[in-house]
Image (cartoon, grey):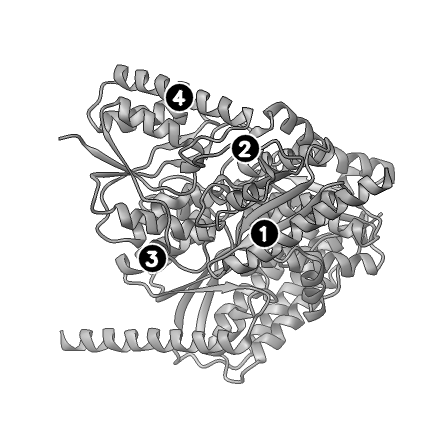
Amino acid sequence: MKIRIGIPRTLLYYRYFTFWTTFFSSLDFEVVISRPTHRSLLEEGFKYVDGDNCIPIKMAFGHVLALQNQVDFLFVPRLLSLDPKSCFCPRTAGLPEMLKYSIPHLPPILDPYIDERHRSTNLLSSLTEIGQKLGKRSKEIKEAFQQAQKAFQVFWEKAKEGSLPPELFPTRSLPNSDKRIAVLGHPYCLYDPFLNFNLLRLLEDSGALVLTQEMVESKEIEVEIKKVGKDIYWTFGREILGAGLYYLYSNRVDGLIYITCFSCGVDSMIEPLLSHRAQRGEAVYFCLMIDEHTGVGGIRTRLEAFLETIERRKRFQKAKR
Amino acid sequence: MKLTVPHIGHLDVFLDTLGKTIGPEFIAPPKTSPRTLSLGMKYAPPSTCLPFKFILGNFIEALEQGADTIAMVSDHGPCRVGMYDVVMQQILRDLGFHFTWISMDDTQIWRDYLVRFNRERRARGVSIWRTLRALRLGWKKLRFCEKVEFLAHRIRPLERKRGETTRVEAQCIKLIHGVNHPNQLREVWKECLRLFDRIEKDFTRKPLKVVITGEGYIVINPHANQEIERRLGEMGVEVTRTVWISHKIAHALHLDCFIPKSKAKAIKASKPYLKYNLGGECNSSIGYPILFKRAGFEGAIQLLPLGCMLEAVAKPILVRVSKEYDLPILTFSFDENLSETMVTTRLSAFIDLLQRRRERSYLKQEKK
C-alpha cells in the first residue's frame, strides 16, 4: 500500500499545489488533499486555535483536523523564503509548530525547512531530506523535483497569460469585457471561494474581466517596488503592492479590489500604501476585510456599489468626450 | 535639527544627555497619555498593531512641539516594524508635517549611521573625546535608570506602605535625569540606593516570583502594558522583566558582548520547541519561562499586542511549555481598548492560583 501524504488545502497550497502534488506523486506517494473549506470545518478548527491568529491560519487548523485520520503523514512546509530578498509571513513559517503543540494525536508532520537565503536549506536539499526520511533515494528525489519544477513552470506561465488553472477556478471563460477589475490579495484569500464568498465568480457573473497579481510580470513588479522607495520584504506583500501599483499607473483596470483578512500583519502595512496611491489614481479602489463574521449580504452590497461606481464613472467619461 | 524619537523605555534619557552636551538638540515627545493613543488611533490604519499607534501618537505630539527630525528603527522582516517607516512617513506627510526621517536600519547601522554621526560631529566642531564622554555618560544614565527599575521590581512587594517604592522610583529617575557630569553619577547612584534603603520593608514576606516575557515594546513600556509591573508588585509579586532597551540597542549595534548572555541562552532553551529562529522576541519569549522556571520562578506572563505575527506563534507553544514544565503562564494580548479592570481581575486570579499552588506544595513537603 502506498504511503498517503496529506496536504491541507489552505495557505500556500493555493500557490504551490502543482509543485507539491507533482513532487509527491512522481515519488510514488498517494497525495490526499483536504476538501474545499466549509463552515463546519472552520468551526472545528476554532476549538484548537486562539483568537490572535488570522482566519487562514484558523482554517489551516480545520483542514488538518479533517485530514488527521486519513493520512500517514501531513505535509506542512515551513517556508521562510524562496528568494534572497523576501520572506513569508512568520505565521506560515511557524504553522507546523502551532499545529504540533495545539492538536493532540496528529500524524507525523513533514516540515521541510526552506530558506533560500542559505545554501544548506534551499528547496532541493530540504526536500531531499524529507524524501530520504521516507526511504527514497536522492536520485529519484532529484528527478521528482525537476518534474515538479516543470509542472510549476507550466502553471506559472499559464497564470501569467491570464488563465487560472481549473483546479482553483473551474469553468472560467474569458469574457471580452470593457470592465476590467484587478483583484489583489494573498493567494489563499483570492482563491478560496469559501473565504471570499466566491467573489471572483460574482465579479465574472457581472460581466467583468478579473485580473490578479499573478498576471503581472515580475519585472514590472520590481520596477514598481523600486519606486516605493522601500524594499518590501514579504514575498506576497511585494507582489501585491507591485502588481497593484502596476495596474494603477498603467491605467489597465477600472477597479481595484484588495481582499485582506482580519489581523493580517502583512496586509495591515501594505494596504495603506496601496490605498493612499489609489486615491489619486484613475481606478476605483476598495478594500474588503474578511473575518469569521463576514456575511455574504454585506459583500454583495459593497460589490454592487463598487460596480455601480465604475459604470457611472465610465458614463461620465463618455459624456465628457 | 531638532531630533525626536518615540518613548521606548528610558531612551529619552540617553538622547537628552547627548542633546545637552554635543547635540543635536533633542525634543522628547510629551509623556505618553490617552491623547497620544487617541491620536494614533485616529490616523493609523485600523488593523495595525498597538505599538504603531503609540509611536505614531508620540511623533504627532513631538512634531507639534517643534521637532523636525525623526529617528526610527527599521528592519528586514519578518515583523512589520520594518514597514513602520514608510507607512508612518506617508501618514505624517498627509497630515501636513514637514520633517526629515532617519530610518535606522540595523543591517547598515555601522556603515551609514556612524559615518553620518561622525560627519555631523565634525560639522558641529565637537572633539571625539567629548563625543565619547557624552556617549558614555548617556549610556550609563540609561543603564542606571534601568537599574532603578530593576530595584523597584524587587523592593515593591516588600514595602509596608503601598506606593512608597513607586514614589522613590520616580524620584530616583528624576535625579538621574539631572546628572550632567560623569563624576556626579556615582553620588546620585548612592543617593538612589539610600532612598531605596529608607523604604520600610517587611522581610518576613515571601513574594511570589513571576517573569514577564513577550513582545518588546509592550514589555518595556508601562504605558502600553497598563503598568502591569507596578500592579503585580503592589499585589505582592516580585517581577523580572526580560526585555530592556539597553540590550536592544547593544544588539542592534552588534555589541552583544556588552550585555548579559541571557537572550542567547533563552533562544537555546527554546530549541526543543521551535527549532529555528523566527526573529523578533518569538524564540526568547518561549525560552525565558523555561530558564526562569529552572531558577525557581513560579509563574510567567506573556504580553503581546493583538495581531502580533511572531508572538502568535509563541502562544500555542507556551501552552505546551506550561504543561511540560509545570509552570502557569498567563497571556495578555493588548489592543487599544485597554481595560484596567480586565487586567486587574485576570492578574488577581492568576496570583490566587500561584498562591494556591505554593500552599499545596508546602503541604506536600510537610507530609513527607
At label 3, which amino acid type do we have? Ser
Compared with A212, A141 (above or below) is above
Q: Do labels 2 and 1 share a chain?
A: yes
> Which residue is at 45% across, 78% downward?
B345
Residue A86: mark in rendering: 2
- Look at the numbered disc 4 and give the secondary structure of its residue: helix
| The C terminus of chain B sits in image quarter | bottom left
Q: x, y percentage for residue A310?
A: 70, 46
Q: Is residue A38 left or right of residue A291?
A: left
The answer to whether residue B236 is visible is: no
Q: Are marks 3 and 4 in contact (CB under 8 Å)?
A: no
Closer to the chain start, of discs 3 and 4, is 3
Q: In this view, does A216 lie to the left or right of B97?
A: left
Q: Do labels 3 and 4 share a chain?
A: yes
Closer to the chain start, of discs 1 and 4, is 4
Q: x, y percentage for residue A57?
A: 42, 49
The residue pinned by badge 1 equals: A288
Q: Which chain hosts label 1? A: A
- Look at the numbered disc 1 and give the secondary structure of its residue: strand
The residue pinned by badge 4 equals: A151
Closer to the chain start, of discs 4 and 2, is 2
The residue pinned by badge 3 equals: A40
- How far, Cα to Cα, is label 3 from label 1? 23 Å
Front position among marks 3 and 2: 3
The answer to whether residue A210 is visible is: yes
- How far, Cα to Cα, is label 1 from label 4? 32 Å
Q: x, y percentage for residue A309?
A: 71, 50
Q: In this view, does A95 lie to the left or right of B109?
A: left
- How far, Cα to Cα, is label 3 from label 2? 35 Å
Number of residues whose C-alpha sits closer than 10 Å to that of mark 4, classed few (under 14), some (14–19) or many (20 or more): some
Q: Which chain hosts label 2? A: A
